[in-house]
């Protein structure tokens, strides 16, 4: 991630957000969902949150390393 262009980093951050929004629409659509499907939706939300957290952490590491601070 340290050498990735800024546009790519922005796009990588948009992916979990967009998928999370889509998943939230499905989960709250009012359609009856099986327990298995509800569990899969919650698991996917957790995966997306972990992905976003890891992307944020990696971008913070990359920005600190590039600026020369905290070395």
Image (spheres, helix red, strand yellow):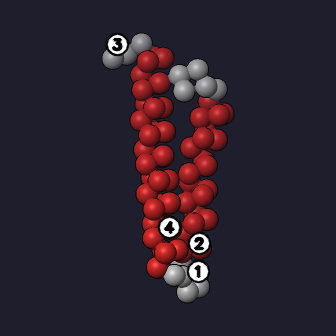
Could you say which disc has been placed on residue 25 in the image? Answer: 2
Q: Nearer the viewer, mark 3 or mark 1?
A: 1
Q: Which residue is painted at 59% across and 73% down in the image?
A: 26
Density class for disc 2 (Cα within 10 Å; few <14, some 14-19, many ≥20) is few
Density class for disc 1 (Cα within 10 Å; few <14, some 14-19, many ≥20) is few
**Distance from the alpha carbon under mark 3 to that under mark 2:** 43 Å
**Distance from the alpha carbon under mark 2 to that under mark 1:** 6 Å
Residue tagged 4: 40
> Which picture quadrant has residue 31?
bottom right
Camera sees residue 30: no
Q: Which residue is painted at 60% across and 58% down in the image?
A: 19
Q: Which residue is painted at 54% across and 69% down in the image?
A: 24
Q: Secondary structure at mark 4?
A: helix
Counting residues from the start of the chain, the first of labels 4 and 3 encountered is 4
Q: Position of residue 9 (x, y in %)?
A: 59, 35
> Which picture quadrant has residue 6?
top right
**Distance from the alpha carbon under mark 4 to that under mark 2:** 15 Å
Q: Position of residue 60 (x, y in %)?
A: 43, 30
């Amino acid at each position: 991630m340290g050498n990735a262009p800024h546009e790519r980093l922005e796009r990588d951050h948009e992916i979990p957000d967009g998928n999370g929004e889509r998943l939230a629409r499905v989960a709250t659509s009012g359609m009856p969902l099986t327990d298995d499907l509800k569990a899969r939706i919650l698991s996917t939300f957790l995966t997306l949150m972990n992905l976003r957290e890891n992307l944020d952490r990696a971008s913070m590491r990359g920005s600190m390393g590039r600026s020369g601070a905290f070395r």
